[in-house]
Image (tube, rainbow, N blue to C red):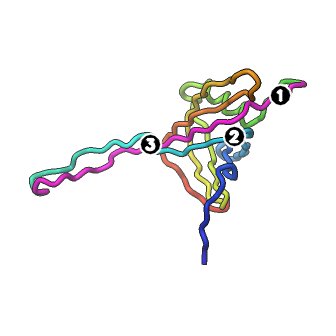
Amino acid sequence: MSNPIEVLSDDFVISINTGTYSSPTWTPILGLKSHKWSESETKEVDASNRSTRGRGQTRVVRRGNSLTFGGNFFEDEADGTRDPGQAAVEALAQQIIPDDLGWFAYETPGGTVKYFQATAKMSDEGGDLDTLCEWGAVCNVYGEVFDAYGS
């Protein structure tokens, strides 16, 4: 019998595919301090008609999701090498059609993974005096989200 409990948000793993579709290489995005999976769009239509006798009937015709994440900018100060996951997100955020979609994996501590394609838009980068440099992105999901367990 299962015993679901609360989990820490820092135990989630967000990765970007730096390989190919047929041979994926899931590269974790390091330095993250926050993440939010959201329903970013819901398009509803009124399906009421005379037979509904004055009662509303709303149907959903479109849904959209987004994943927002942020944390600290990671770089090797000796040679400028960036965290491979952060660098891949930044590279994707510079692309336009037809190269503007990347594959992401959003994994819970229990091993459930959401796989999805998304565009990326970088958040503000920087910080104040005597603080760590902030880094982040918003990924707008393109199409269907595929759920898997134990991947």
In percent of width and height, residue 122 lies at 61, 28
Of callouts 3 and 1, which one flags the residue occurring earlier in the amino acid sequence? 3
Quadrant of the drawing holding the N terminus: bottom right
Residue located beneath label 3 in the image = 64
Of callouts 3 and 2, which one flags the residue occurring earlier in the amino acid sequence? 2
Viewer-nearest residue: 48 or 38: 38
In percent of width and height, residue 57 lies at 22, 53
Start-end of magenta stretch: 52-78
Q: CA distance from mark 2 to mark 1?
A: 18 Å
Q: Which disc number belongs to residue 32?
A: 2
Asked if residue 57 is among those painted magenta in the image, a careful observer would answer: yes
Label 2: element kind: strand
Find out whether the residues at labels 2 and 1 contact each other: C-beta distance under 8 Å: no
Amino acid type of the residue that numbered disc 3 sits on in the rendered structure: Gly
Amino acid type of the residue that numbered disc 1 sits on in the rendered structure: Thr
The quarter holding residue 87 reads top right
Label 3: few (<14), some or many (≥20) within 10 Å? some
- Say which residue appears at 61% left-offset and 37% top-offset: 102
Asked if residue 22 is among those painted magenta in the image, a careful observer would answer: no
Residue 48 appears left or right of 15: left
The quarter holding residue 99 reads top right
Q: Which disc number belongs to residue 70?
A: none
Amino acid type of the residue that numbered disc 2 sits on in the rendered structure: Leu
Label 1: element kind: loop
Quadrant of the drawing holding the C terminus: bottom right
Q: Select label 2 or label 1 by which is in front.
A: 2
Residue located beneath label 1 in the image = 81
Of callouts 2 and 1, which one flags the residue occurring earlier in the amino acid sequence? 2
Label 3: element kind: strand
